[in-house]
Amino acid sequence: MKKLGLVQVYWGNGKGKTTAALGLIARALGRNLTVCLIQFMKSGIENNADFEEPGEIKILKKIDGFSYKRFGTKKWVIGKPDSEHIKEAKKAVEFTLDAISLGKFNLVIVDEILYAIQLGLISEEKVIEIIDAKAKETELVLTGSHKAYPKIFEKADMVSEVRKVKHPFDKGIMARKGIEY
């Protein structure tokens, strides 16, 4: 097997960035690699009445070698982030730095981290710090954001833009259980 250790980025205004990363998780676990999925802004409060674990997480948690941690609050960031949003983002960054630098995982996916930049929760420089801190043979995947980040893209080995042509949300169709979560 060729050595791991590349940095991949999935970004753009289309649906499928997280889905692409989840497909990579399935592929890695199928080859007995260890995987850590870290999610920014995904309602980290799992013992509240509104929380429903996404279907992909339910199945992945049953597979040896898969580790998962989500961070966030019960409310969306609208306008300037509040202190609770920023606190959760800082916790996510610290967890990510630990996961990526120790070499414990073959693959680390940091879902929605680019949106965290876009929404003012973390800086682009902090994401570059994460890239620079990764263990040599740990594959790193970053997802999220409609906005391009040239400094991050320059450090990455692969950058894929997911572009929206048409989306059910445009017709008022909201997220559907088993399809979007």
Image (cartoon, rainbow, N blue to C red):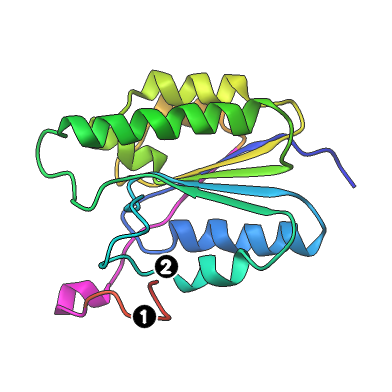
Quarter of the view holding residue 177: bottom left
In the picture, the disc for residue 53 is 2
SS of the residue under disc 1: loop
In this view, 146 is above or below 131: below
Around disc 2, counting alpha carbons within 10 Å, would you say few (fewer than 14), some (14 to 19), or many (20 or more)? Answer: few
Residue 58 rendering spot, x and y as whole percentages: 53, 70
**Circle 1 residue:** 177
Q: Is residue 159 left or right of residue 107?
A: left
Q: Quadrant of residue 83?
A: top left
- Outermost residue to the right: 1
Seen at 30% across and 46% down, the residue is 146
Between 145 and 76, the one lying in front of the other is 76
Question: In the image, which residues are magenta?
Answer: 158-173
- Amino acid beneath label 1: Lys
Check disc 1: other Cα within 10 Å, few if <14, some if 14-19, many if 20+: few
Counting from the top left corner in percent of width and height, residue 69 is at 50, 48
Q: Is residue 51 left or right of residue 16?
A: left
Q: Residue at x 42, y 21 (%)?
A: 126
Is residue 163 covered in magenta? yes
